[in-house]
Image (cartoon, rainbow, N blue to C red):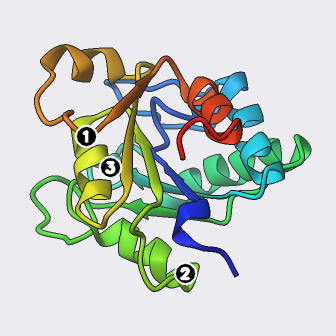
Amino acid sequence: MITAQQLVILDRDGVINHDSDAYIKSLAEWIPYPFAISAIARLTQAGFTVAVATNQSGIARGFYDETTLNAMNERLHGLVEAEGGQIAHIAYCPHGPDDQCGCRKPLPGLFTEIQDKLTLSSLKGSWMVGDSLRDLQAGESVGCRSVLVKTGKGEKTLAKGDGLEHALVYADLAAFVDDLIAGALD
């Protein structure tokens, strides 16, 4: 049985893999950061549970389909498992910004899906690691502690500065994981 404090929720594009303003539309375009894959494995090995919450509006826009997204997710699972880690759940929103869904970040739907899937009573005290303000807003709305990484869109988000009052800022996922595992963030 895991606790919320042992849960780290990650955004995908820009945190785990390279991001693209033109969308990641194929398995060939999905290029993971090697440091992120090993960081996820280290989290698992240190007793943390890792989940992913990702907006994938490219599906609604017709740039790729769920089969392609599933192939990317399978690759992610395989790479993490090869390093000795595990991702407990990947929650994704396939909707576009005008679809009026409840799962597109900054709304909390992906987080309640993760909470239900992992049978947690609350996400209060969990970690949300993202590269955009909407990632952090979604996590904060359910009680997550916020971490902004400078990879992906993180530098642009940091330059804007708005809404980051509660966020810790790290160069990348690996740097955050170093501090978390070392107990520097208790």
Q: With 154 as the anchor, is 35 left or right in this view?
A: right
Pair 3/2: label in front = 2
Between 78 and 165, the residue placed more toward the observer is 165
As drawn, the label of residue 62 is 3
Q: CA distance from mark 3 to mark 2?
A: 28 Å
Classify 110 as above or below 36. Answer: below
At x 62%, y 39%, the residue is: 180
Q: Are marks 3 and 2 in contact (CB under 8 Å)?
A: no
Asked if residue 60 can be seen in this view, the reply is yes
Question: Which image quadrant for residue 34?
Answer: top right
Q: With 39 as the anchor, is 5 left or right in this view?
A: left
Residue at the disc numbered 2: 117
Residue at the disc numbered 1: 166
Pair 2/1: label in front = 1
Give the structural element (helix, strand or loop) at label 1.
loop
Asked if residue 105 can be seen in this view, the reply is no
At x 45%, y 20%, the residue is: 151
Between 101 and 50, the residue placed more toward the observer is 50
Give the structural element (helix, strand or loop) at label 3.
loop
Looking at the image, is mark 1 or mark 3 earlier in the sequence? 3
